[in-house]
Amino acid sequence: MARNKKMNNIKTVALWNREPQSEIGYISLGNELIAWAQKESSLSIDGFPISKMIAPSIFHALLDKSTEFSQAYDLALGIIGSRRERLAHEGMLNALIVRDAFI
């Protein structure tokens, strides 16, 4: 029983190191990122890698490896930023959160 639990942990750690193996993989991950950012519940870009079991440090390193993925990241950041600004104006989100996102 303990061995199976240890093996499950090893599989989980392997997922944290996931990195696309081709440009098509980067484009696919970028498309997933944009779709995720378009959800009304997405308020922080850092939630995406966590939802995909990708370590944030690995996720941010991917930005230097693919122009297409970097552009998808910029678009997703803009989508989330616009939503946060709108929610702050509507009084549904603390304005300090919006301010801190752009510092």
Image (cartoon, grey):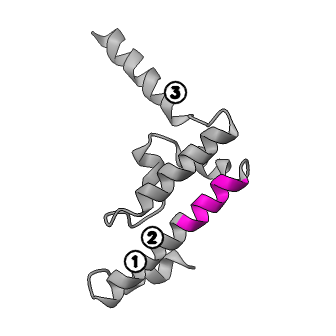
Residue type at mark 3?
Answer: Ala
Q: Which residue is mark 1?
A: 84
Q: Which residue is rendered at x = 64% and y = 53% of the image?
A: 69
Instruction: Write the residue at 49% across / 78% down.
Output: 100
**Toward which corner of the image does residue 19 lie, by quadrant?**
top right
Q: Which residue is nearer to you in this view: 61 or 78? A: 78
The residue type indicated by label 2 comes to Ile
Secondary structure of the residue carrying numbered label 1: helix
Looking at the rendering, in which quadrant would you find the C terminus? bottom right
Q: Which residues are magenta?
A: 67-75
> Of callouts 3 and 1, which one flags the residue occurring earlier in the amino acid sequence?
3
Residue 56 relative to residue 47: left or right: right
Find residue 25 and report its image quarter. Answer: top right
- Contact flag, marks 1 and 2 (Cβ < 8 Å): yes
> Disc 3 marks which residue?
14
Q: Is residue 38 visible?
A: yes
Let me know if residue 97 appears in the view: no
Q: Does 23 lie within the magenta span?
A: no
Residue 28: horizontal and vertical position, in percent? 56, 44
Q: Quadrant of the N terminus?
A: top left
Where residue 70 appears, as percent x and y from the top left, is 66, 58
Q: Which mark is residue 80?
A: 2
Mark-to-mark CA distance, 3 and 2: 29 Å
- Label located before the other in sequence (3 or 2): 3
